[in-house]
Image (tube, grey):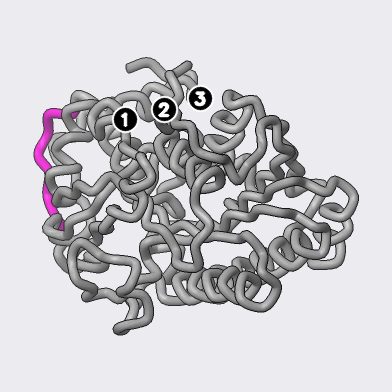
Amino acid sequence: MTTDLPGPPQESVPSLLRPGARVFVAGHRGLVGSALVRRLAADGHEVITRGRDRLDLRDAERTGAFLRDVRPDAVVLAAAKVGGIMANRTYPVQFLEDNLRIQLSVTAGAYAAGTERLLFLGSSCIYPRLAPQPIPETALLTGPLEPTNEAYALAKIAGIVQIQSYRRQYGASYISAMPTNLYGPGDNFDLETSHVLPALIRRFHEARRSGAPALTLWGSGSPRREFLHVDDLAAACVLLLERYDGDAPVNVGSGVDLEIRELAALVAEVTSYQGRIDWDTAKPDGAPRKLLEVSRLSSLGFEPRISLRDGIARTYAWWLEQQGAQV
């Protein structure tokens, strides 16, 4: 399936990312990385990638040697161990240690290789569980984290501090961005490790195909979440590489949220599931609300272009195509 890639508005301002720049996308096979590859290539940049089978980014020595060899103009650090509530609760050691190792080796290796620009991608889970809503970037480290993904969040917070430290100590033009909940082509649909939206798409699809009269979902359905299509994120990342050079992280989101039960109803509509939706309130909800305050990004000229319903439909069509399934 092909889609039009969203892009930032064109203005006559000096770009911090030169035309045709050589950009290493760490994690190019993932949801975010694959979208970045599409966006950067469409914008005329030379994209550099290296698969996990050839380079383990947790290995600082090999990662540093690779970066010294290819000497990219810019690096986008999209590689990470990610997953939903169940995965985070089951494997906190891996979510902490793997992400720390990746961040340390890629950032240090990029600086040693003379990389001019680096964008580190974190997550909205870095903010306190009961942060003010919408969540401003200044809420970082002002309260306790959500326990269900604390290990992952702490690793990402360490990444932000690492980027800020390279700026302050070495004057590096490195920046960080905190995306909201993402979805789109390339998403993970494994029910054991996926995030909420792809899990809902798969479960509703399978329930419709099997003729199940009801489907039970985790939690109460009352938490509110914000979602951004990954192609919109990729456009925002390029915009940040071109125009942002600040010490503070930048929130990347749609600025709009909805209840999980509303999301479930929307997915049911897109997948044509007409059965009953039940809620298992004995299961955890996670944070009650996560909506990012995005004025810092908006001031640079960014606006999402893919609506949630359209994005879900595109993602569902992509997954069916990968499965060779019929609607």
Q: Earlier in the sequence, mark 1 or mark 2?
A: 2
Q: Residues within 10 Å of mark 1 (few under 14, many from 20)?
A: some
Residue 163 shows in this picture = yes
The dominant secondary structure in magenta is: strand
User: Which corner quadrant holds the C terminus?
Assistant: top left
User: Residue tagged by mark 3?
Assistant: 322
User: Residue tagged by mark 2?
Assistant: 6
Q: Position of residue 76 (x, y in %)?
A: 62, 50
Of 140 and 313, which appears nearest the observer?
A: 140
Q: Quadrant of residue 266?
A: top left
Q: Position of residue 222 (x, y in %)?
A: 12, 58
**Is 275 colored magenta in this rendering?**
yes
Residue drawn at point x = 38 percent, y = 45 percent: 300
Q: Quadrant of residue 250?
A: bottom left
**Is 130 colored magenta in this rendering?**
no
Residue 170 lies left or right of residue 305; in this view the side is right
Q: What's the CA distance linking mark 3 and mark 1? A: 24 Å
Residue 59 shows in this picture = no
Q: Check disc 3 and give the amino acid type.
A: Gln
User: Residue tagged by mark 1?
Assistant: 305
Q: Check disc 1 and give the amino acid type.
A: Arg
Report the magenta residues as a range: 273-280
Instruction: Please tell me how many numbered marks the rendered image carries.
Output: 3
Q: What's the CA distance linking mark 2 and mark 3? A: 23 Å
